[in-house]
Image (cartoon, grey):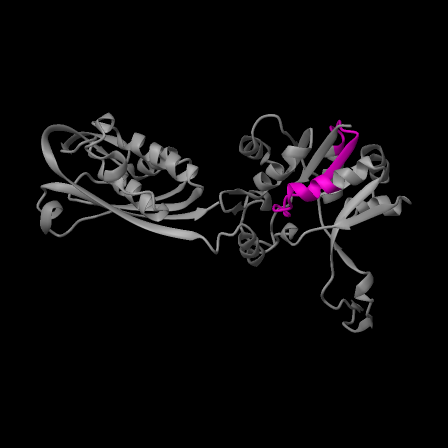
Amino acid sequence: MSISAIIAAAGSGERFGAGIPKALIQLADRTLVQHAVSSLAPVVDQIIITAPAGFEAQISELVGEGIIVVTGGATRSASVRNALAVATGEYVLVHDAARALASTDVASRVIAQLKNGAVAVVPAIDVVDTIKVVSKEGFVVSTPDRASLVSIQTPQGFNTSALREAHASQNEATDDAGLIEANGGAVKVIAGEERALKITTPADLNTALSFLSLGSDIRTGIGTDAHAFGVGLPLWLAGLHWPGEEGVEGHSDGDVAAHAICDALFSATQLGDLGSNFGTDRPEYAGASGVRLMQETYSMVTKAGFAISNVAVQIIGNRPKIAQRRAEAIAAISDALGGAKISVSATTTDGMGLTGQGKGIAAIATALVYKQ
């Protein structure tokens, strides 16, 4: 009994105000559509994503091989019909990318009901607010008994042939279960979950972050490094070689920006410091590049259960001039740290101290991480 999954991700995100499709909005370490894929992938055989026109390649690159991306339609129902055309499973889940945190468990429970013979299954949570029907003139028409009301979520599950038949009407609905109902089908309701909230506004995004436990375990760290210039040495800084610039003395390649970043990450995650991990008592790191040290630091940080939110590094010295290669430096550091968000800046000390007198170069870095 094969299972297909359709992730509706063609929404513009206009209400969110991000200027990009909602499915591409970042929630912690990944986009909404990537969260949705990760929750469904363990329990389905095929995943189809409906993408906004012009964003098909970007979404395909984000989610990787083995996932089908089709162009969405002008409406949600039209998008689902486009995906249904290539669905191969006997059953199909229809899920909104905006409900990015719906769990694998709720998808599994929907599938179990389908295998027990249900034609359509939807997760739902109780309505806690009083609901009123209001006229166009702004007056209350009635107050339904909320005891019989529920708020419907996704993923919703269907017998694929039944859903195709319901969509053959070309009618529109805010959810696919509505089309089944209109076609005379029975819809089974199961318990949903609070974390499957629909992310529509920035406030919703903050609520979603709380389900990821980011608010309770965000950590920061600081790191510094300084080295004196040497004679005839190449300069490595921020993961880059700087031809024509005098290099620095050091156990490794003397990349002060990389070293400060490593120290900041170790500080934030309580994994020691640069000396305890890559010090002079570790001969295997003699001459090691700053990129290698950042890569190994990233590996240690992730193995300890942390993800990097942001790293900022400020390079302190009279030379080299950082501005002309800032974009390269950001790319090199980000690549070494698994794609983390990076800021690079530079300053001088107005002639004071080691750096101001042109005798060396220094860097200070901060890191923001969170426990996954």
Residue that sits furthest to the bottom in the current view: 139
Q: How many numbered circles does the render carry?
A: 0
Residue at image coords 9%, 41%:
359
Q: Is residue 104 magenta?
A: yes
Q: Position of residue 251 (x, y in %)?
A: 18, 32
Residue at image coords 76%, 35%:
92
Q: Is residue 168 visible?
A: no
* Figure quadrant of residue 66: top right
Q: Is residue 280 visible?
A: yes
Residue at image coords 53%, 56%:
206
Please tell me which residue lies in front, 146 or 17. Answer: 146
Please tell me which residue lies in front, 370 or 98. Answer: 370
Q: Position of residue 273 (x, y in %)?
A: 27, 42
Q: Is residue 347 magenta?
A: no
Q: Is residue 261 left or right of residue 250?
A: right
Please tell me which residue lies in front, 151 or 138. Answer: 151
Residue 239 position (above or below residue 192): above
Q: Is residue 210 left or right of residue 269?
A: right
Residue 131 position (above or below residue 160): below
Residue 141 position (above or below residue 332): below
Residue 183 position (above or below residue 235): below
Residue at image coords 73%, 28%:
86
* Figure quadrant of residue 342: top left
Q: Position of residue 332 (x, y in %)?
A: 34, 33
State the extent of the magenta-drawn residues as a range: 84-109
Q: Is residue 214 left or right of residue 181?
A: left
Q: Position of residue 43 (x, y in %)?
A: 68, 34
* Picture quarter with the N terminus: top right
Residue that sits furthest to the right in the current view: 184
